[in-house]
Amino acid sequence: GAGGAADADTDEDDDGDSESEDDYLRLAPAATDAYVFVANPGRDTVTRIAVSNLAVITAEVGHIPSTVQTTSDYSLAITLDEGDDSVTVIEAETMKPTSVPIRDNMNSLSLSSSGEWAMAWYDPDRESLGTSNGVISFNEVSFVRLDPPTHVPMAVGYNPKGVRWSDDGSRAVVVSAGTLAVVDLTVETPVARRIPLADDELDAPVAEEVVLTPDGQFAFVRQRGVETLQVVDLALETVTPVDVGDDPTDMDVTPDGNRLAVVARSSRQVWTYDVNDPFAVPALVDFPADTAWGSVSFAGGSDRAILYTNAALEASLA
């Protein structure tokens, strides 16, 4: 989903804003079975701690590494180096770093589920740790192929909000203000295939969140202030709205990938959809009228989810 600072309202009333999930653990370690990696933005290094004997090795990376992540096979650690606009790919066993220049002033990073690609982009709602030279691209992102490290800049649409990766790593879907950009990662030089979410992209509701089905057939898009979800058939490039409750503010998919849950905060409901048949009638779960929960999150391999809010002073969860 879209990152950013939590709503800082001082009253307890629901003000109609969307939920925004804080990235409190931006500098959290990246843990694997064998190692723990820690980014040190003040020293331009990454530290590797061995789980078996706590041995410590440190490698130099780019200037101000703001985050470190590991690939799914744990063979590589990746940093976004905001101070010199680069991504550094580190071999986990040898700690050998390889830096790749990217677009200026990117402050967010995501790795594909297959561990073959990373994407960096600029999120205006997230603090930037680098030194801006005044040049910020509001429609371009940086894809980085990790082996061999290669930079592929790409225009995806105004104000990219984030990326979703297909389970097999063959496709990336980038949600922007009024478009989806579908990127085929199996070709030598990927390009973005843009699907408009409205007839007038410049006047389209802001797309805040996208969820991709495991097979990569459909994408669900939640837009700010819109009481429908946009179901995008990525093969046919069709966009079909489906009903949802009042004020949808967050959504999450079950760990098995079969159902999508959407919180309709003003309706005090959770709407759940069959992702394999998204146009079937959704199931509804009501929650108490005296609550203002607006975020939903599934835990681990469970089909249970937590409801909570960070947009109002609601001292409860369910």
Image (cartoon, rainbow, N blue to C red):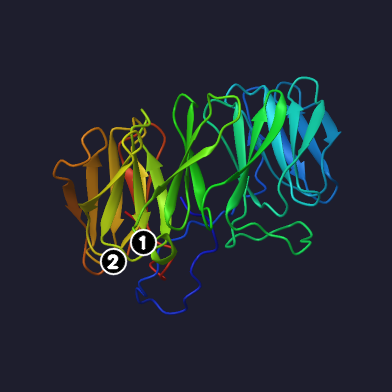
Residue 125 screen position, x and y as percent: 57, 62
Residue holding disc 2:
291
Q: Quadrant of residue 148?
A: top right
Q: Earlier in the sequence, mark 1 or mark 2?
A: 2
Residue holding disc 1:
316
At a point 62% along the width and 54% down the height, the residue shown is 122
Q: Quadrant of residue 286?
A: bottom left
Label 1 crowd bin: few (<14), some (14–19), many (20+), radius 10 Å: few
Q: Is residue 317 above or below residue 115?
A: below
Q: Is residue 41 above or below residue 310?
A: above
Q: Is residue 35 visible?
A: no
Residue 82 left/right relative to 283 = right
Marks 1 and 2, how far apart at CA: 8 Å
Label 2 crowd bin: few (<14), some (14–19), many (20+), radius 10 Å: some
> Tag 2: residue type?
Thr
Q: Of 9 and 245, which appears nearest the observer?
A: 245
At a point 42% along the width and 61% down the height, the residue shown is 206
User: Farthest left residue?
Assistant: 281
At a point 30% along the width and 55% down the height, the residue shown is 263
> Tag 1: residue type?
Ser
At a point 38% along the width and 31% down the height, the residue shown is 216
Badge 1 element: loop
Residue 238 left/right relative to 54 = left
Badge 2 element: loop
Residue 209 screen position, x and y as percent: 42, 52
Residue 247 screen position, x and y as percent: 29, 64
Q: Are marks 1 and 2 in contact (CB under 8 Å)?
A: yes
Q: Is residue 285 visible?
A: yes
User: Farthest front residue?
Assistant: 199
Residue 168 left/right relative to 106 = left
